[in-house]
């Protein structure tokens, strides 16, 4: 009985992350949020460069969230999770690109 409880506990721990992993992910998230905030608030870059910086930081933030909090690399079968993630990203990009296209070409001039 004791061995079963220990095995169950160890299996549960492997699906979660360690405290140091969460702290590192949290620090990366804070840094990736503060950088564009400081750049925009202090008007350090022109509009185009600031937009590119925000987009790059958003992509990095997405990667940090997946790796440190969603444990995308720790799954037994990450292929299925990756396929679902790619499908979600395709839908997201379709919605965003379609919205930008509609707003660009239907703007009242």
Image (cartoon, rainbow, N blue to C red):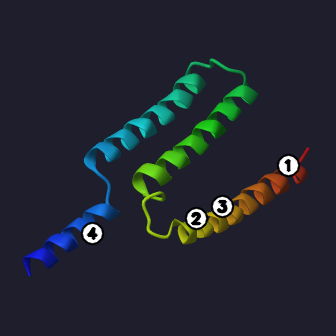
Q: Nearer the viewer, residue 36 or 20?
A: 20
**Which mark is first along the chain, 4 or 1?**
4
Disc nearer the start of the sequence (1/3): 3
The residue carrying pointer 2 sits among few (fewer than 14), some (14 to 19) or many (20 or more) residues within 10 Å by Cα, namely few
Q: Residues within 10 Å of mark 1 (few under 14, many from 20)?
A: few
Helix, strand or loop status at disc 3: helix
* Residue 69 percent coordinates (x, y): 40, 53
Q: Which residue is mark 4?
A: 11
Of residues 77 and 105, the one drawn nearer to the viewer in this rendering: 77
Residue with the mark numbered 2: 82
Res 64 label: none
Q: Are marks 2 and 3 in contact (CB under 8 Å)?
A: no
State which mark lies toward you, 1 or 2.
2
What is the spatial separation of the Cα atoms under label 1 and label 2, in whole angstroms?
A: 32 Å
Q: Nearer the viewer, mark 2 or mark 4?
A: 4
Q: Residue at x 66, y 61 (%)?
A: 89
Say few, some or many: other residues with alpha carbon within 10 Å of mark 3 (under 14 / 14 to 19 / 20 or more): few
Give how far across and how far down residue 94 sits, in percent.
Answer: 75, 62
Q: CA distance from mark 1 to mark 3?
A: 22 Å
> Mark 2 falls on what kind of element?
helix
Q: Quadrant of residue 93?
A: bottom right
Marks 3 and 4, how far apart in space? Answer: 30 Å
Q: Nearer the viewer, mark 1 or mark 3?
A: 3
């Amino acid at each position: 009985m004791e061995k079963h409880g220990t095995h169950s506990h160890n299996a549960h721990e492997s699906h979660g992350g360690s405290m140091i992993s969460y702290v590192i992910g949290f620090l990366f998230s804070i840094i990736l949020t503060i950088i564009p905030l400081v750049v925009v608030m202090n008007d350090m870059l022109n509009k185009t460069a600031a937009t590119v910086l925000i987009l790059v930081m958003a992509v990095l933030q997405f990667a940090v969230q997946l790796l440190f909090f969603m444990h995308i690399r720790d799954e037994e079968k990450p292929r299925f999770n990756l396929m679902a993630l790619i499908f979600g990203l395709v839908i997201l990009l379709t919605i965003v690109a379609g919205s930008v296209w509609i707003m660009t070409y239907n703007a009242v001039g």
